[in-house]
Image (cartoon, coloured by chain):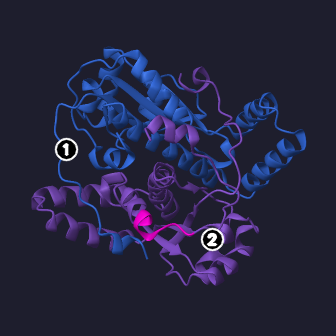
Chain colours: A blue, B purple
Amino acid sequence: MDFMEIVKSRYATKKFNGKIVPESKMQELYEMIRLSASSYGIQPWKIKVVTDAATKKALTPASYNQAQIESCSHLLVFCTDTNLKGLLVEFREMLVKGNVPSEVIETMIKMIEGGSNSMTEEQQNAWLSKQVYLAAANAINGAKALGLDSCPMEGFNASEYSKILKLPKHLQPTLVIPVGYAADTARPKLRYAKDKIFI
Amino acid sequence: MDFMEIVKSRYATKKFNGKIVPESKMQELYEMIRLSASSYGIQPWKIKVVTDAATKKALTPASYNQAQIESCSHLLVFCTDTNLKGLLVEFREMLVKGNVPSEVIETMIKMIEGGSNSMTEEQQNAWLSKQVYLAAANAINGAKALGLDSCPMEGFNASEYSKILKLPKHLQPTLVIPVGYAADTARPKLRYAKDKIFI
């Protein structure tokens, strides 16, 4: 499926049919998400994958009882990793393993630290969580490319999610993306005309 | 090109060869961006397209003199539209034109207003600007799908951009994406292993 067809046919699925997506297909989707762009390549995300019915049921009231949570196959909880210090430790290790010259590594880390030092904690977390939306876009487009449906959702109670999923404090649930096979049909896409948004 | 190939081959291009992308191809890219997902479908973005050499030159010092700005074909300045009241007026018009039942429209707008009323101005702007990253992901993946290269950039001076481009105050430059044909080659992609990010 070419990319134009993907973006035309992808839609926010309101209900799934409960069918389970084969693991091999999910692995392809995870790879598409994994390869996502991010600022400096720091990948400030962790994705909690929920497949068991009991946990989905427990998360439903924390999701305004939306039908996607229990009816999907895999529920992907995109969390922002807000522990920048920890991220930079992993980041440095990754660059070293990738044979990036050490002076390049130090320059990049200094730039990231310099940028983040000029931010409040709220600004820093906002900056990190924006990156998660790049990965989320790969998830929803990637799902469609693989013949799957999905729904990016901000409407959920993040602190309830943290409790139910026993997430460490530095992982902030940012977007929930149920994946599976749709039990509904797409409504016509409503978008502004090009000349309204390209100025 | 299938989506896996797109995400594998896309990379942050550091220098373009100056060749101009045909307008018909850019129109396809704009359509891919236009169809992007966003919270409630409110599309809180405006994209300033810069093609003239003088403006690119003026923007270069405001972009830490990075070579992408002057060497690209089309420079897309993704702005967050932070005027939520204005956005909701346009949004309502779009939904009415799209024959969405009026009770559905009113419910959606009440939900958006309710959600935004519980946010500080900073939180609201952060929420709106996150949506822009969904559109940006369509831009960088869409460019690759069309045989083009791109580079998502946060490293620029937003207030200088606003001045040079004479942007109204409610449009906040959020991401700059030069598009064109690469004059460099991709370095190996460095990413965390799947089991580090899928938990």
Q: Quadrant of residue B71?
A: bottom right
**In-image side of A17 versus B167 (left or right):** left
Parent chain of label 2: B
**Residue B7 in the image: above or below residue A20:** below
| Residue at figure coordinates x 38%, y 44% from the top left | A154
**Residue A79 visible, this orientation:** yes
Label 2: how many residues lie within 10 Å, few (<14), some (14-19) or many (20+)? some
Q: Quadrant of residue A104?
A: top right
What is the span of residues highlighted in magenta in the rendered image?
B20-26
| Front disc: 2 or 1 | 1
Q: Position of residue A55 (x, y in %)?
A: 36, 19
Label 1 SS: loop
| Residue at figure coordinates x 66%, y 43% from the top left | A41
**In-image side of A170 versus B46 (left or right):** right
| Residue at figure coordinates x 19%, y 63% from the top left | B95
**Residue B159 in the image: above or below residue B98:** below
- Amino acid, disc 1: Ala
Residue, far right: A103
- Amino acid, disc 2: Ala
Which of the numbered marks, if any, corresponds to residue B158?
2
> Which residue matches tag 1?
A186
Q: Position of residue A181 (x, y in %)?
A: 25, 28
Which of the numbered marks, if any, corresponds to residue A88?
none
Label 1: how many residues lie within 10 Å, few (<14), some (14-19) or many (20+)? few
Q: Position of residue B191 (x, y in %)?
A: 65, 33
- Does the magenta segment cover residue B23? yes
